[in-house]
């Protein structure tokens, strides 16, 4: 059996994060009553004239700059003609040549090594409306059209066929989504269809130069879904070729529940969309000053923020990676740090609380960090209580549980429950003496040279003090007493 290599190119459609649609003043808000966000322009009434949304162009240029694209300053639009059941005017206003952004790139991390994926283009276009075939659970035997989504601005980001595994595609999409979210140019909410991906997959015998037959997979609504669909598709293609059969260029659908791709339509013989310049939108030039203005508005992007977190806060690469993996997490971290009493000593513990305890709880309850029941001020207070020695790490975990359940302030919890750590030596000495008296066996073992036997006595002290004895002090006092 020949060995094959995988080639993947991704097309990402991201809805541009603007208040109004790309050619009219209708709202882009998701989930409104069907057809309540529509007007004569976005419902394709004959003679209605589109007006370009400047904010959409700004978002495109910022995205292009952030991904190292060349911005094509002559801006023009084209009509892509087709029988579109979801665009009543039967053409989509899009960009053909030139797109607003050409030749960009994105770095992904594969097994600790950086790989650059080149991105062919980003062009601006209008989204299609939505065909509705069921109401609630009732399947209709006719189609309804909901125009709310029609003409929302979209950026289509088309990569070169340069990814070579499902994991690389996963990393590319994760990184791209993170950057768009940092920029704020798309909300990228995949469940709401604000970011969609088509994956183009082919395989070829190792060493062959020409690309193999490309299969396009649609209908994926999560990044892990894309990874699974590609993995399935690669195996399917290998089986077909190994059996001596041929692949045909086609579009397939990902059936997430069954975990398989199914043929949707053949794509042999490219469609001729008869592109021509959109006569209702006059070509115009983007001035240099506009591009420079957009450049100054770029926020600190994930890579830079990660490096700064490591340098400024002394975090490990692992922690910095996690904290900058979404802008919301990075903002939460820095807000917590700014609320803490001693930034320098709080930097690491706050990072730990976020990446372990908080992250675990949020994941389990499927809550985004932006909606966390524990505020960043409260995480800062908790860490401060630990650093000042007021509570032990063990008690802090119990306090955190309550902070999460009740959105409560840790200082109040500690006060009301009397959880303050006992650091008074004489009180601890007394408990240690009791514990030693009650543990003759452990004492004997310790005296016979088994130092670890002290652990059992420490445990007893902690139990007697309801976990409130300062563990460092307990250890110190017990060893002193036992060695006497
Ligand atoms: P279309 O509109 O037909 O989908 P596009 O040019 O918009 O065409 O997108 C083509 C995508 O397919 C690009 O991302 C490109 O990298 C990818 N691609 C092209 N040929 C192959 C191939 N043989 N194998 C995998 N991906 C491919
Ligand atoms: Zn409208
Ligand atoms: Mg395509």
Image (spheres, grey):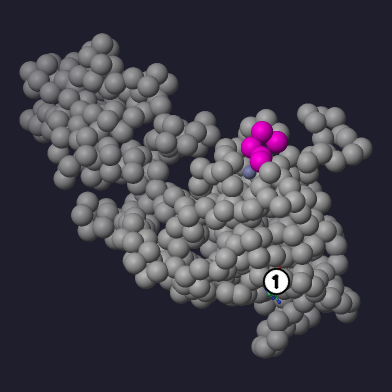
In terms of image quadrants, where is residue 161?
bottom right
Residue bounds of the magenta highlight: 35-39
Quarter of the picture holding the C terminus: top left
Is any part of residue 126 visible from this angle? yes
Name the residue beneath numbered marker 1.
Answer: 276
Residue 456 lies in magenta, yes or no? no
Closest to the observer: 382 or 280? 280
Quarter of the displayed picture in which ligand 1 can be seen: bottom right
Residue behind label 1 places its C-beta within 8 angstroms of ligand 1: no
- Describe the element under mark 1 as helix, strand or loop: strand
Residue 177 x/y as whole percent: 51, 55
Residue 60 x/y as whole percent: 49, 60
Residue at image location 39% in from the left, 48% down from the top? 327
Q: Residue most toward the front?
A: 47
Residue 187 x/y as whole percent: 51, 47
Quarter of the picture holding the N terminus: bottom right
């Amino acid at each position: 059996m020949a060995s094959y290599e995988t080639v993947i190119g991704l097309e990402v459609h991201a809805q541009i994060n603007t208040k109004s649609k790309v050619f009219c003043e209708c709202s882009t808000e998701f989930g409104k009553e069907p057809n309540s966000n529509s007007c004569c322009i976005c419902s394709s009434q004959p003679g209605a004239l589109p007006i370009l949304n400047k904010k959409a162009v700004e978002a495109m240029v910022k995205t292009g700059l952030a991904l190292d694209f060349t911005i094509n300053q002559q801006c023009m639009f084209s009509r892509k003609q087709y029988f579109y059941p979801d665009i009543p005017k039967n053409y989509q206003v899009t960009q053909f040549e030139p797109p607003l952004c050409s030749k960009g790139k994105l770095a992904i991390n594969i097994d600790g090594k950086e790989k650059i994926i080149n991105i062919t283009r980003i062009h601006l276009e209008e989204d299609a409306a939505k065909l509705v075939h069921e109401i609630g659970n009732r399947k209709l035997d006719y189609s309804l059209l909901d125009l709310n989504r029609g003409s929302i601005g979209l950026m289509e980001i088309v990569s070169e066929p340069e990814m070579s595994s499902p994991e690389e595609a996963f990393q590319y999409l994760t990184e791209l989504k993170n950057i768009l979210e940092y920029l704020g140019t798309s909300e990228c909410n995949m469940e709401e269809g604000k970011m969609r991906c088509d994956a183009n997959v082919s395989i070829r015998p190792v060493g062959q130069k020409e690309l193999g037959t490309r299969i396009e997979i649609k209908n994926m609504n999560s990044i892990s879904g894309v990874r699974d669909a590609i993995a399935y598709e690669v195996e399917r293609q290998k089986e077909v070729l190994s059996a001596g059969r041929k692949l045909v260029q086609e579009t397939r659908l990902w059936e997430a529940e069954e975990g398989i791709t199914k043929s949707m339509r053949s794509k042999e013989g490219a469609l001729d969309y008869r592109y021509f310049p959109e006569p209702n939108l006059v070509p115009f030039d983007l001035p240099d000053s506009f591009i420079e203005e957009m450049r100054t508005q770029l926020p600190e992007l994930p890579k830079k923020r990660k490096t700064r977190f490591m340098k400024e806060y002394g975090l490990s690469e692992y922690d910095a990676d996690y904290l900058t993996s979404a802008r919301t997490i990075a903002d939460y971290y820095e807000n917590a740090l700014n609320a803490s009493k001693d930034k320098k000593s709080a930097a690491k513990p706050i990072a730990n609380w976020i990446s372990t305890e908080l992250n675990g709880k949020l994941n389990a309850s499927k809550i985004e960090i932006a909606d966390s029941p524990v505020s960043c001020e409260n995480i800062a207070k908790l860490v401060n209580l630990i650093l000042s020695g007021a509570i032990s790490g063990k008690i802090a975990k119990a306090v955190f549980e309550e902070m999460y359940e009740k959105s409560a302030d840790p200082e109040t919890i500690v006060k009301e429950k009397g959880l303050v750590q006992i650091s008074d030596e004489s009180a601890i000495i007394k408990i240690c003496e009791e514990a030693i008296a009650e543990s003759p066996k452990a004492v004997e073992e310790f005296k016979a040279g088994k130092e670890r036997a002290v652990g059992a006595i420490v445990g007893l002290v902690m139990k007697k003090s309801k976990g409130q004895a300062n563990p460092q002090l307990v250890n110190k006092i017990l060893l002193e007493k036992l060695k006497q």
